[in-house]
């Protein structure tokens, strides 16, 4: 698994996992604030960015076990975890199935269950047949609000390039992982202090998904970030950084 580590030696460790079709550069808006106070490990899921691209289908469990192997390789016994979308799904699996490894949990713009499965399987077939360029604009439309895309096209353009450059087989395998995912019964097993963050204008995982997660994890907190679509950490970087740091360091 490809990873980059930065920040303060000896500080608490924070893992950062991104969404389907991304790479670890998506966390750049938060990196200075996080690295000032934490040891930050950004990673690419299997099939994404610089990580190996095994043939799909993948399972959320596979992606979670990849993170556990990364922790072992880096000699990290326990860490906080922050994941967005697919990264959040992996975080829920980790906190439920390896609770001894997760200190605190942040789940951003994600879902415990995201049907219909047929839609994900169709998308997997599309990118295998036609490539990532065939879905890049549609994905970008879910990642950012129309206002943000219109006002800041230069900031949005690198994210379209990120989607288009994502390995088609890795993206398809991730689609299949989401198609087969249902973490709702796992939520009650999560004991790590948890912050759930939703984007108020997120069309991919609307705030109702965050409410389901919040209701299922005892003692969790829900924050809805205004004027943010799916990549809330990019569209509202300061607000998200503040929420994450406040939770992880409290």
Image (cartoon, rainbow, N blue to C red):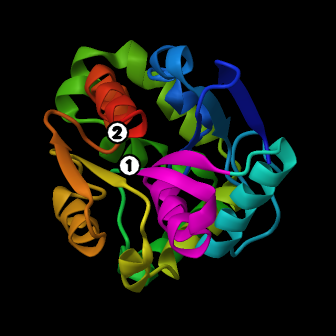
Above/below status of 4 relative to 109 = above
**Residue 115, how many percent across, how many down?**
35, 79
Is residue 189 toward the left or the right of residue 21 in the image?
left
Residue visible at 44% across and 60% down in the picture? 192
Above/below status of 247 relative to 190 = above
Residue visible at 29% across and 33% down in the picture? 243
**Residue 111, how many percent across, how many down?**
35, 65
Along the viewing direction, whichever of 136 and 41 lies nearer the viewer: 41
Along the viewing direction, whichever of 18 and 153 lies nearer the viewer: 18
Please tell me in which quadrant of the rendered image residue 119 appears: bottom left
Please tell me in which quadrant of the rendered image residue 57 appears: bottom right
Above/below status of 248 relative to 182 = above
Nearest to the eye among marks 1 and 2: give it: 2
Q: Kindly state the secondary structure of the residue where label 2 is placed.
A: helix
Q: Quadrant of the C terminus?
A: top left
- The residue indicated by pointer 1 is 138
Residue 6 visible here: yes
Q: Kindly state the secondary structure of the residue where label 1 is placed.
A: helix
Label 1 crowd bin: few (<14), some (14–19), many (20+), radius 10 Å: few
- Residues at marks 1 and 2, CA–CA distance in whole angstroms: 33 Å
> Residues in magenta?
78-105
**Residue 20, how many percent across, how many down?**
53, 53
Label 2 crowd bin: few (<14), some (14–19), many (20+), radius 10 Å: some
Is residue 39 toward the left or the right of residue 136 in the image?
right
Along the viewing direction, whichever of 129 and 22 lies nearer the viewer: 22
Is residue 98 toward the left or the right of residue 149 in the image?
right
- The residue indicated by pointer 2 is 247
**Residue 190, how many percent across, how many down?**
43, 70
């Amino acid at each position: 698994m490809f990873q980059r580590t930065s920040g303060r030696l000896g500080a608490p460790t924070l893992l950062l996992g991104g969404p389907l079709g991304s790479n670890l550069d998506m966390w750049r808006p938060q990196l200075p604030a996080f690295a000032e106070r934490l040891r930050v490990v950004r990673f690419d899921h299997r099939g994404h960015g610089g990580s190996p691209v095994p043939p799909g289908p993948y399972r959320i469990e596979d992606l979670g076990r990849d993170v556990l192997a990364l922790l072992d390789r880096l000699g990290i016994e326990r860490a906080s975890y922050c994941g967005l979308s697919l990264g959040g799904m992996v975080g829920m699996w980790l906190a439920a199935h390896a609770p001894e490894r997760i200190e605190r949990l942040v789940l951003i713009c994600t879902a415990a269950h995201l049907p219909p499965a047929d839609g994900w399987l169709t998308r997997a077939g599309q990118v295998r047949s036609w490539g990532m360029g065939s879905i890049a604009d549609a994905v970008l439309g879910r990642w950012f609000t129309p206002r943000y895309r219109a006002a800041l096209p230069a900031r949005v353009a690198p994210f379209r390039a990120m989607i288009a450059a994502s390995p088609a087989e890795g993206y398809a395998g991730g689609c299949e992982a989401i198609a087969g995912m249902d973490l709702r019964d796992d939520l009650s097993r999560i004991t790590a202090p948890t912050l759930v963050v939703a984007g108020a204008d997120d069309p991919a995982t609307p705030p109702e998904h965050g409410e389901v997660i919040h209701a299922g994890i005892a003692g969790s907190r829900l924050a809805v970030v205004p004027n943010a679509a799916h990549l809330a950490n990019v569209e509202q970087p300061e607000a998200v950084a503040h929420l994450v740091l406040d939770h992880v360091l409290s």
